[in-house]
Amino acid sequence: MSRGKLKKLVEELLLQGTSPHKLAMMVSLGLMIGIFPMVWGGTLLCMIIAFLLRLNHAGIQTVNYLAYPLQIALMVPFYRLGSRLFPWVPAMSKTVMRHAGGSAVADKFMLIFLAALKAVGVWLILAPPAACLLYFCLLPPFTRLHVRREGMTSGASQLIHR
């Protein structure tokens, strides 16, 4: 998506009555949920968060889907960091998967599940502070954009009422 199209999308969201506060929250939460280290979970999390915080569903899902390349790029680092931070089972590797004992399918599934759980643990540690930081970085530009838009619309409405 080009910079001009992204700017136009943000302006459209502001024109729909989205406050700068909610817009910054929507973008920061949508991005942080968008890098969730499990492919299936982001959309559902965005729906729940948007409902609970009364955010624009389409806006948060758009940011979530735009973050998909970042999610793929960060998946391996999340899994590797998870195996270092939570060393309670062997790190997932070809050797470990090949030599999973017992009922091989159940053991391999458990190793994959635990590796995913560790990656989600890392995400839970890193995502909230990153979302807060991103929120506070986005709030000033969105506020300026909102003030500029309000000035333009109030000027246009004054012209119409004359």
Image (tube, rainbow, N blue to C red):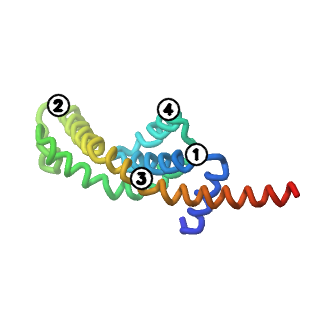
Disc with the residue nearer the chain's start (2 vs 1) = 1
- Pair 1/4: label in front: 4
Picture residue at 16% right of the left edge, 46% below the top:
83
Camera-near label (4 vs 3) is 3
Question: Element type at marker 4?
Answer: helix
Q: Nearer the viewer, residue 51 or 62?
A: 51
Q: CA distance from mark 1 to mark 4?
A: 15 Å
**Residue at the (36%, 55%) spot, across then down:** 72
Q: Position of residue 40 (x, y in %)?
A: 41, 41
> How far is disc 2 from disc 3 in space, using C-alphas?
50 Å
Q: Which mark's residue is nearer the viewer, 4 or 2?
A: 4
Give the mark nearest the N terminus, 1 or 4: 4
Viewer-side residue, 91 vs 132: 132
Left-right relation of 6 to 46: right
Name the amino acid, label 3. Answer: Phe
The residue that disc 3 covers is 136
Q: Which comes before the other along the chain, label 3 or label 1? A: 1
Which amino acid type corresponds to the residue marked 4 in the rendered image?
Leu
- Residue 52 disc label: 4
Q: Residue at x 50, y 32 (%)?
A: 52
As measured in the structure, the alpha-carbon distance from the residue carrying label 4 to the one carrying label 2 is 42 Å
Q: Position of residue 29 (x, y in %)?
A: 44, 46
The secondary structure type at the circle numbered 1 is helix
Sequence-wise first label, 4 or 3: 4
Amino acid type at mark 2: Ser
The reply to whether residue 137 is visible in this rendering is yes
Mark 3–mark 1 Cα distance, whole angstroms, equals 22 Å
The dot on residue 58 is 1
Secondary element at image label 2: loop
Q: Position of residue 32 (x, y in %)?
A: 39, 48
Q: Which residue is mark 2?
A: 103
**Spatial separation of the CA atoms under disc 4 and disc 3:** 21 Å
